[in-house]
Amino acid sequence: MERALVAEFEAVLADIPSLLHAGNIGAAVTLAGVPQDMRGFGHVKAKNVAIARARMAQLRQQLAPAREVALAAD
């Protein structure tokens, strides 16, 4: 799981520069810090990873250009 999380987060970080603009810098910074919440062992870590993934999805929506948000809503 640890290796998969690293690869998953590296992919998220790679997307940020292409989505970044003055209006979403705060969301980008918050997104970059989400892995710090993935703490614990066993079922505790699994719960924290699920919460962090949901938070990352929410933040990625905030980073997405308006066109992508409109497509996701359809």
Image (cartoon, rainbow, N blue to C red):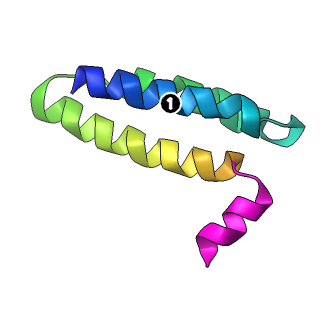
Residue 56: x and y in percent read 50, 42
Q: Quadrant of the C terminus?
A: bottom right
Occupied quadrant, residue 23: top right
Report if residue 25 is visible in the image. Answer: yes
Q: Is residue 73 magenta?
A: yes
Front residue (pair 52, 2): 2
- Horizontally, is 8 left or right of 14 in the view? left
Q: Residue 41: percent from the left, percent from the top? A: 15, 23
Q: Main secondary structure of the magenta part?
A: helix
Residue at 23% in and 40% down: 47
How crowded pointer 1 is (Cα within 10 Å; few <14, some 14-19, many 20+) is rated as few
Farthest residue toward the right?
22
Q: Residue at x 33, y 27 (%)?
A: 5
Q: Which residues are magenta?
A: 64-74
Residue 16: which quarter of the image? Answer: top right
Q: Is residue 41 above or below residue 65?
A: above
